[in-house]
Amino acid sequence: MFQLTWQEFSRRPHIARLPLHEQVRQFQWELQRHELLIEYVSSAAAAAGSGGAGGGNGTVVQAIQAQQDQSINSYVENDYIDNYFV
């Protein structure tokens, strides 16, 4: 999973033009969302690892993580996040 940092977050064009207090608020919101996503992926990995003969499949977990990373990045990069802060 990608690691969200303030430096990277604050340089996004749709974030950089906001006042600082709004940048902080959105950063906190996105960190919270990122933590929930990590919990979801971890629980999906645990479920995949506990089912079936022969244990889990690391490839499945990596595919889930890659798909989630891509979804979040495209969500943010395409300015969909602005719809929540109107």
Image (cartoon, rainbow, N blue to C red):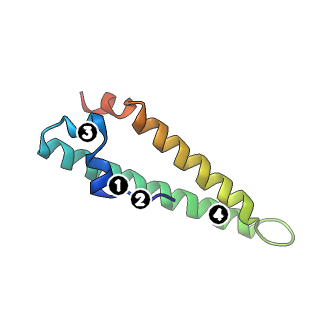
Whole-number angstrom distance, CA of label 3 to CA of label 2: 20 Å
Whole-number angstrom distance, CA of label 1 to CA of label 2: 5 Å
Do the CB atoms of the residues marked 1 and 2 lie less than 8 Å apart?
yes
- From the viewer's perspective, is 74 left or right of 29? right
Whole-number angstrom distance, CA of label 2 to CA of label 4: 15 Å
N-terminal of the pair, mark 1 or mark 4, is 1
Q: For marks 3 and 1, give the one nearer the viewer.
A: 3
Please tell me which residue is depicted at 53% across the width and 57% down the height of the picture.
40
Whole-number angstrom distance, CA of label 3 to CA of label 4: 32 Å
Please identify the residue farthest to the bottom as the structure is shown: 54
Q: Which residue is mark 3?
A: 15
Q: Amino acid at mark 3?
A: Ile
N-terminal of the pair, mark 3 or mark 1, is 3
**Residue 68 image point, x, y percent:** 55, 48
Q: Which residue is mark 4?
A: 45
Q: Out of 72 and 16, give the one closest to the viewer.
A: 16
